[in-house]
Amino acid sequence: MKPSFATVLVLCLFLVSSSLLEVTMAGSPFCDGKCGERCKEAGVQDRCLRFCGICCEKCKCVPSGTYGNKHECPCYRDLKNNKGKPKCP
């Protein structure tokens, strides 16, 4: 019995989405430590940690300090959200 195209497509989408979820939830020791330091004074800490983690995983760097210093990591500085504003804290 040959699986239908729709079945294969659904299976592939499930595998891709579950692997992406695992990557975003896992975090790395490097990013967890750097983002913890970056977000320690944030007003909304869970949101800061989430976005910092996304940016860190993508850029492999986090600026020093709790604010500013984005010139140290141009990738982190240049990531924008869907409204064109800076994505990374």
Image (tube, helix red, strand yellow):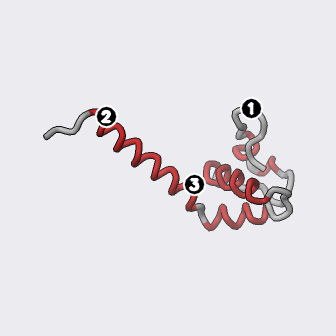
Q: Residue at x 40, y 48 (%)?
A: 15
> Mark 1 highlights which residue?
83
* Separation of residues labelled 3 and 2 (CA atoms): 27 Å
> Mark 3 highlights which residue?
24
> Mark 2 highlights which residue?
6
| 32 to the left or right of 68 | left
Q: Residue at x 74, y 47 (%)?
A: 88
x and y, in percent, of residue 8 in the image: 30, 39
x and y, in percent, of residue 29 in the image: 62, 67
| 64 to the left or right of 30 | right
Q: Nearer the viewer, residue 70 or 11?
A: 11
What amino acid type is highlighted by mark number 1? Lys
Closest to the camera, between mark 2 and mark 1, is: 2
Dot 1: few (<14), some (14–19), or many (≥20) neighbours within 10 Å? few
* Separation of residues labelled 3 and 1 (CA atoms): 22 Å
Q: Residue at x 74, y 54 (%)?
A: 47
